Image (cartoon, helix red, strand yellow):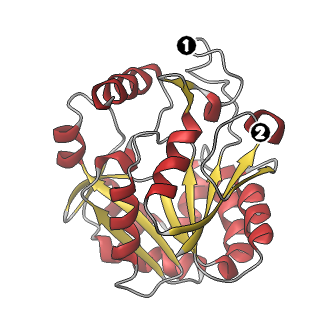
């Protein structure tokens, strides 16, 4: 059993804002329910989650119907701040599952599979990836950002398992990388030109990525391949929203 944090503080100010009127992405309506509640329900139904913390605009989130053992807390100014607040509120050093609020197709089975695979290797940070073929077979026409590795082409998932003890050191570096995301020369200086070139050319293996992340952050990182496309389908543009609405309607 692990505790879980849902990152639910993102404002709806980008491509979805003219499509969905809700002020926060977590509150975007899907089949009559706020998007974040789908994520919370999948976590609760997995039977592997002890407590759930939903962090974001506390007053707005308080109106949502969450599963039992869910607590709403005010989030921070940044994602890293919010993770820190959640980890401190949990008050322990055990592994914590971190999910974003914009993956409403998440299932209990996907959560269980991810946690089971994580339990098979020892690491400080676990990150799921989904093969492009898996995503496109499950949801034809889905538009994802893919990266080519030696083992194949993958998209990232929006579920993480992390050791809270690593968060203070990792957050400083992660915030620096986010700050430099639109400054390629500075980002390359951090990652290494050779590493970045091999990544662009698809010559990196997943093991090499694990090694680079582990070295850069001073932690043990593990990449987990998931057969569940739902982990990689986040709602951040109108086409995602329509795909998710259709998928939810089909399951109803």
Q: Residue at x 55, y 13 (%)?
A: 19
Which mark, by number, is residue 234?
none
Q: Which residue is mark 1?
A: 19
Dot 1 falls on a residue whose secondary structure is: loop
* Image x and y of residue 192, in percent: 49, 68
For marks 1 and 2 on the same chain, the one whose residue lies earlier in the sequence: 1
Badge 1 local density, few (<14 within 10 Å), some, or many (20+)?
Answer: few
Q: Quadrant of the C terminus?
A: top left
Q: Quadrant of residue 137?
A: top left
Q: Residue at x 58, y 16 (%)?
A: 20
Tally the numbered discs: 2
154 vs 35, nearest the viewer: 35
Q: Quadrant of residue 129?
A: bottom left
Looking at the image, residue 210 lies above or below residue 173? below
Looking at the image, residue 86 lies above or below residue 180? below
Q: Residue at x 75, y 55 (%)?
A: 82
Alpha carbon separation for disc pair 1 and 2: 24 Å
Q: Is residue 149 left or right of residue 94?
A: left
Q: Please identify the residue farthest to the bottom as the structure is shown.
A: 122
Q: Quadrant of residue 201?
A: bottom left
Q: Which residue is mark 2?
A: 62
Looking at the image, residue 95 lies above or below residue 26? below
Q: Is residue 104 left or right of residue 96?
A: left
Looking at the image, residue 157 lies above or below residue 128? above
Dot 2 falls on a residue whose secondary structure is: loop
């Amino acid at each position: 059993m692990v505790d879980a944090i849902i990152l639910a503080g993102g404002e709806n100010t980008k491509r979805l804002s003219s499509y969905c009127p809700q002020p926060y992405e977590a509150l975007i309506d899907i089949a009559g329910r706020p998007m974040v509640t789908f994520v919370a329900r999948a976590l609760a139904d997995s039977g592997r989650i002890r407590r759930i913390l939903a962090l974001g605009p506390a007053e707005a989130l308080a109106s949502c119907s969450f599963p039992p053992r869910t607590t709403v807390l005010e989030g921070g100014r940044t994602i890293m701040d919010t993770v820190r607040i959640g980890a401190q509120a949990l008050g322990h050093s055990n592994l914590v599952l971190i999910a974003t609020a914009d993956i409403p197709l998440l299932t209990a089975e996907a959560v269980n599979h991810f946690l089971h695979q994580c339990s098979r290797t020892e690491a400080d940070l676990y990150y799921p990836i989904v093969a492009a073929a898996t995503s496109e077979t499950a949801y034809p026409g889905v538009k994802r950002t893919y990266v080519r590795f030696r083992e194949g082409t993958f998209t990232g998932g929006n579920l993480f398992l992390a050791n809270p003890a690593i968060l203070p050191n990792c957050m400083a570096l992660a915030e620096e990388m986010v700050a430099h995301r639109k400054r390629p020369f500075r980002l390359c200086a951090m990652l290494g030109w050779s590493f970045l070139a091999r990544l662009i050319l698809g010559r990196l293996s997943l093991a090499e990525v694990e090694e680079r992340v582990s070295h850069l952050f001073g932690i043990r990182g593990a990449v987990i391949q998931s057969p569940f496309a739902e982990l990689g389908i986040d709602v951040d543009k109108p086409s995602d929203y329509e795909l998710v609405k259709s998928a939810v309607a089909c399951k109803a």
